[in-house]
Image (cartoon, rainbow, N blue to C red):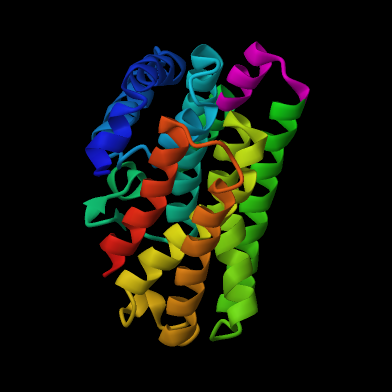
Amino acid sequence: MTQNEIRQVVADQFRLFEEEYHRHTYSGVQLMQEVNDYVDRRSGKRLRPLLLLLADGGRDIVRASRLAAAMEMLHSASLMHDDVVDESTERRGQESVNGHWGNAVAVLCGDYYLSRVMNIMNELDEKEATRIVNNVVKEMCEGELIQQQYLRGGVFDKGSYMDVIYKKTAVLMRSCCELGNPLLREFGEHFGMAFQLRDDLMDYGTEETKTLPPLKELQAAFEQRIEAAVDSLSKLPETPYTKALKHLALNLLQLSA
């Protein structure tokens, strides 16, 4: 399945997610709306909402679309805050929010997004879902702190590197899958790890990756995670949604080639 074919599986749900996302990020403050529009135009493939909607499998599309909006906002908030922490004025070749408006606006807008996440969770009023989202925020903060801690000491060993990418990237993707269907928590974790390993492999040798473990170790870990993600799906009945998740993982292999 191509990326477009995967997205077609949840095309209707995705439209509902977009409506929820824009409804909850809307602000009467002009500057906030300028940032909203800027972030929206520069948003990537909305991978985290896609994971959640596929994991939900069409069981409760209203709930799933709201949770998908919350997780996308949480992701956007983390990017804004990370760019301030890393003193980065660009993200993937484009000006970051702090690069365009400065650190103060980036921090405040990130906080605004987090407040909207809390608003969605209050609307849903699900204790377990709220626990999962709260834990994501905690672990992502811990991941950034661990990274800062090791950057002061030089090169990452494999264990510390894996801990950082687990907390900074995989936890959010794991939780998207878990919120959609707790049985897909394991898939989300393996997929999230593979996703970040893929990104680092593609950038390997640049200034940003000079502190990473050896290339062969990362390549082996990446392939193991893809295999584990696909294997975790074999324990579940095959549906158009689980088939799409499988191909989403396998497509990472093609993208990293």
Total count of labels: 0
Q: Depth check: give the residue in front, 210 or 124.
A: 124
Q: Determine whether 219 is above or below 127 in the image.
A: below
Q: Depth check: give the residue in front, 19 or 197.
A: 197
Q: Which image quadrant for residue 237?
A: top right
On the image, the x and y values in percent for residue 188 come to 55, 47
Is 166 placed left or right of 221 in the picture?
right
Residue in the picture at 44% in, 47% down: 79
Which quadrant holds the N terminus?
top left
On the image, the x and y values in percent for residue 9 come to 34, 28
Q: Determine whether 22 is above or below 256 in the image.
A: above
- Identify the main secondary structure in magenta: helix
Q: Determine whether 14 is above or below 41 in the image.
A: above
Which quadrant holds the C terminus?
bottom left
Q: Depth check: give the residue in front, 240 or 251.
A: 240
Answer yes or no: is residue 204 visible. Answer: yes
On the image, the x and y values in percent for residue 204 come to 34, 78
Q: Depth check: give the residue in front, 190 or 47.
A: 190
Residue in the picture at 67% in, 51% down: 139
Question: Range of the magenta residues?
Answer: 117-127
Answer yes or no: is residue 112 visible. Answer: no
Residue in the picture at 39% in, 70% down: 200
Q: Which image quadrant for residue 184?
A: top right
Residue in the picture at 39% in, 19% down: 13
The magenta stretch spans residue 122? yes
The magenta stretch spans residue 100? no
Q: Determine whether 153 is above or below 24 in the image.
A: below
On the image, the x and y values in percent for residue 98 come to 36, 47
Q: Which image quadrant for residue 170?
A: bottom right
